Amino acid sequence: MIDPALLRENPDAIKASQRARGADESLVDAAANADVAWRKAQLEFENLRAEQNAASKLVAADSNSRTCVPNKTLPANSLPLRLKKKRPRWLPACKSFRRV
């Protein structure tokens, strides 16, 4: 198992290790690319989750005010769907990193 922090900080050391064992060095590049994709997908997911949490707090604050505002559109309406759409991108990146 390759330490992701070492992969990010010093990929040349890992490539040298691969070379010394007669293994394919391109696996290091593939692992680095998979790590970048995973981190990007994870960041997008976390940003959407934070947006959803903020919208949930807004809904809770509105419900506590005891006022009814009909036809009010909240940004939370589309967030669960957007989170579900991001999840398929996140999973392959994670699996790809683990497979390499």
Image (cartoon, rainbow, N blue to C red):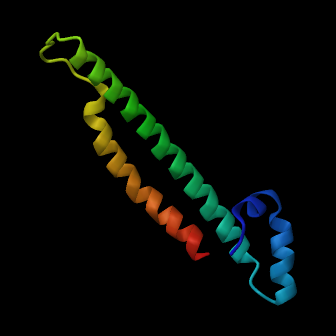
Quadrant position of residue 19: bottom right
Does 75 appear above or below 99? above
Give the residue displayed 80% in from the left and 81% down from the top: 18
Does 96 appear above or below 21? above
Does 98 appear above or below 86? below
Does 79 appear above or below 89? above
Residue 90 % position (x, y)? 46, 57
Residue 63 % position (x, y)? 21, 19
Q: How many labels does the image show?
A: 0
Question: Quick one: which residue is furthest to the bottom in this view?
Answer: 22
Quadrant of image for the N terminus: bottom right
Observer-nearest of 82 and 76: 76
Residue 84 % position (x, y)? 33, 50
Give the residue displayed 47% in from the left and 65% down from the top: 92
Observer-nearest of 68 and 92: 68
Quadrant of image for the C terminus: bottom right
Residue 37 % position (x, y)? 57, 57
Left or right of 4 in this view: 80? left
Give the residue displayed 83% in from the left and 62% down from the top: 10
Quadrant position of residue 56: top left
Left or right of 66 in this view: 81? right
Quadrant position of residue 34: bottom right
Left or right of 72 in this view: 6? right
Observer-nearest of 29 and 45: 45
